[in-house]
């Protein structure tokens, strides 16, 4: 019997990758932990059935990242604990696919590189249809922390750098989970391409604002909230992922004034420090 425990964090969008296949994200401190255990036998078992984690996604990740010969002779037991709300654009599925891939690699593929571990998670995400592009940008920010700029179509990290430590993300989670039509993001492909170019020059806040105005206009949030957040002192603000959550990144001394912008809206507000820490895994 062997057992591995992994931990990593969530992320918020700087540039949505759906329109162009290229994205940028920033790690935040909301955490996720997974334990993967093996016993003689066969099958994949989830210990926390009551949570709304995608069991299909987890099964696909295990089948992608564990060699077939090992699946034949090991029963694999998985439990996941997550602080990341799922279904709001805060990268919970990328965090799940990456963390399961990392824990499985520890037990079955000890020589796997970071990129190989991430690729297994990305392929499983596409296969499970939880993501259109495989969300490589999201997976990288959850895994490495800090800012990442990626080419999702070619599974390439273009840039990865630490974020200033005195920042927090203020995340608004609306009561309604309604999301707009994600395929329409392609309408503004040129705009997303410009936002990505800004991120690639490390001009993350303007990239995030441009992304925020474009995504909110298409996905049915009010773009005015983005300008109100900047007016309140946020450095950058955007719909995160495909929504419906909205994230604003602020210096810590501006938290209360930016939080006020969300106070008239129906939903809950979470404050999370930025995360620069890389994912960790160890055998128990």
Image (tube, rainbow, N blue to C red):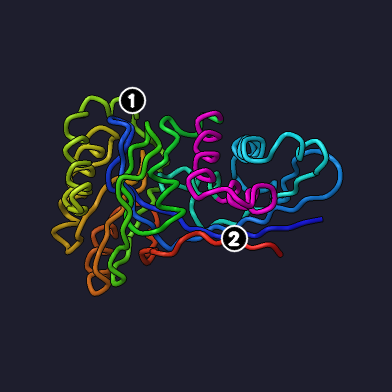
Nearer to me, 283 or 98: 283
| Residue 183 numbered mark, or none | 1
Relative to residue 205, is residue 57 depicted above or below? above
| Image position, residue 137 (x, y; %) | 38, 44
Q: As rendered, which of 207 and 3 lies closer to the eye?
A: 3
Instruction: Please rate how many residues cluster around mark 2, counting C-alpha atoms within 10 Å: few if below 14, some from 14 to 19, many from 20.
Output: some
**Image-based side of 119 in relation to 189, left or right:** right
Residue at 17% from the left image edge and 34% from the top image edge: 191
Picture layout, residue 160 above or below residue 75: below
Q: Where is residue 258 in the image (x, y as percent from the top left)?
A: 23, 63
What span is in magenta? 99-127
In three-dimensional space, the C-alpha distance between marks 1 and 2, rounded to whole angstroms, equals 36 Å
Q: Position of residue 23 (x, y in %)?
A: 31, 41
Marker disc for residue 281 = 2
**Chief SS of the magenta region:** helix
Q: Please identify, in this view, whether the residue under mark 1 or under mark 2 is nearer the observer.
A: 2
Whichever of labels 1 and 2 marks the residue nearer the N terminus, that label is 1
């Amino acid at each position: 019997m062997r057992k591995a425990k992994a931990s990593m964090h969530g992320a918020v969008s700087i540039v949505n990758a759906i329109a162009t296949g290229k994205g940028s994200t920033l790690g935040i401190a909301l955490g996720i932990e997974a334990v993967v255990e093996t016993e003689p036998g066969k099958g994949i078992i989830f210990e926390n059935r009551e949570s709304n984690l995608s069991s299909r996604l987890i099964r696909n990740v295990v089948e992608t990242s564990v060699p077939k010969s090992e699946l034949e002779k090991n029963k694999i037991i998985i439990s996941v604990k997550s602080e990341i709300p799922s279904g709001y654009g805060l990268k919970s599925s990328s965090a799940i696919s990456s963390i399961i891939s990392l824990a499985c690699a520890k037990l079955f593929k000890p020589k796997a590189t970071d990129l190989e571990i991430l690729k297994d998670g990305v392929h499983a995400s596409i296969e499970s249809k939880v993501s259109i592009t495989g969300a490589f940008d999201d997976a990288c920010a959850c895994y490495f922390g800090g800012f990442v700029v990626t080419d999702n179509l070619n599974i390439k990290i273009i840039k990865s750098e630490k974020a200033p430590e005195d920042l927090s993300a203020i995340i608004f989670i609306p009561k309604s989970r309604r999301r707009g039509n994600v395929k329409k993001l392609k309408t503004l492909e040129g705009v997303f391409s410009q936002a990505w170019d800004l991120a690639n020059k490390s001009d993350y806040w303007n990239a995030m604002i441009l992304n925020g105005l474009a995504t909110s206009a298409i996905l049915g949030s009010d773009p005015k909230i983005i300008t109100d957040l900047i007016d309140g002192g946020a450095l950058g603000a955007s719909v995160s992922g495909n929504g419906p959550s909205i994230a604003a990144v602020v210096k810590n001394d501006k938290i209360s004034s930016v939080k006020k912008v969300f106070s008239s809206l129906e939903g809950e507000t979470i404050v999370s420090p930025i995360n620069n820490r890389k994912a960790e895994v160890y055998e128990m």
